[in-house]
Amino acid sequence: MSSASAASAPEKAPDDSSKLKTFLSILRKFVGVADIASVRFSLPAHLLEPTPNLEYWNYLDRPETFASIGKSNDELGRMLEVLRFWFTKDLKYIKGKPCKPYNSTLGEFFRCKWEVEDSAPGISVPSGPNSQNGNTSVDDGGGGKLANVCYLTEQTSHHPPVSAFYIECPDRGVSARGFDQISAKFTGTSVRVVPGEYNRGIFVNVEKRGNEEYQMSHPAAYLGGILRGALSITVSDTCYVTCPKTRIKTILQYQEDSWIGRAQYKVEGLVFRYNPGNDTATKIKDVPESDVLARISGSWHGQIHYTLAGTTDPQLLIDIAPLFPAAKTVPPEETQLSNESRKFWSGVTEAILDKRYSQATKLKQDIEERQRQKAAERKQNNETWQPRFFTSPTTTSGKPELTEEGRQALQGVSNGEYKLEESQKMGA
């Protein structure tokens, strides 16, 4: 066998046990480091999932729940629709094992869409003393017509690593935006992941309801099972969903499972009236009974129920068990730009899938070295890099704004018109 053919021959695939041992040996070097996410350490290719980070990090595992936000004619019903989306946004962690995708490079971007039936039910609630208008009907929207849910994301900063995203369902007048940035710390037995300083959560806007805005904050999560060789995601933290316009807030408390026995993944919460100008309720126990609109209970791996105030009859909000992440539609390969995630990482992906791990690692290192060179050139020329599709790398509000080019790109995703010009200021 020639040296060339030997180099391209498939290598023996490491099993999960050896992968975890290698991963643990690398993580141990970061015990005590305040934020290993900002270090952006490079992993060998055989430890990576052949998926770009920007494609992996989206909140649309069930896009039909996003498209159904705003159907209820009752403001409490609309908050419950937002919560239904919340509990389905990260099915990938429930239905599959956690994995490490490629680190995003500056200027890299990803776009896709989902075509869903606009027939997901709105949530109607009985009229009562806490309901503003007592209207129990829902807007059935498209009546079963297909609706596009479109997604655009761009790596807008490298130090710290931040990406901006924008989601839109034009048919329903629902959109969402935010910055993805995490801070992670290895404790010796697990990795604790929390939002970074620019990650203020997901901001959902419902245009047809007077531009109601819902802010959903992310709870802390833990990547555990490293020592026993079975990676899993757990959550034991409090998070919030607020809507200043309707003056309705939700507190969700994810309960910590005992290390003895099977995990229950329990969550409980309250939906209640609050004062946006004097918001002091951070725990369920802080909420006066007179302000409660509904109670949330169940398992975020199974069924979630809500119980309206003054009743004892739980109603099903969402059943996670039968759901799996929905397939996405991406631009045809010939229309993808060189810094579009799938094309940008295609060489690395092909090598990993062919089990040519040494070649994949080399290609990945070449990409990382080119990025370092371009960063050095910008520094030498005193140049400040600017994103293409978003107006700034970060904002203190946590709400990225689309550029005109970003709006056109997102509209093109919806219309299936994917052609874009190559950018001369590509960061990577």
Image: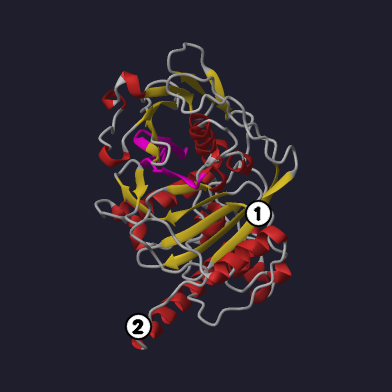
| Other-residue count near label 2 (Cα within 10 Å), few / some / many at <14 / 14–19 / ≥20 | few
In the figure, residue 129 lies in which quadrant? top left
Image height of 399 relative to 279, above or below: below
Work out whether 410 lies above or below 371: above
From the image, tell me which residue sits under label 1: 113
Residue lying at 46% horizontally and 40% vertically, measured from the top left: 231
Who is closer to the viewer here, 304 or 211? 211
- Which residue matches tag 2? 379
253 lies left or right of 178: left
The image shows residue 229 at horizontal and vertical percentages of 45, 39
The correct choice, above or below, for 186 with respect to 51 in the image is: above
**Residue 126 visible in image:** yes
Where residue 267 appears, as percent x and y from the top left, is 42, 27
N-terminal of the two: label 2 or label 1? 1
Q: Is residue 352 visible?
A: no
Three-letter code for the amino acid on which mark 1 is drawn: Lys
Q: Secondary structure at mark 1?
A: strand
Residue pictured at 43% horizontal, 13% vertical: 310
Residue 382, position as x, y percentages in the image: 34, 85
Query: In the rendered structure, which segment of residues is drawn in magenta?
Result: 210-239
Q: In screen coordinates, is 290 left or right of 215? A: left
> Which of 343 and 134 lies nearest the eye of the viewer?
134
- Answer left or right for 371 relative to 327: left
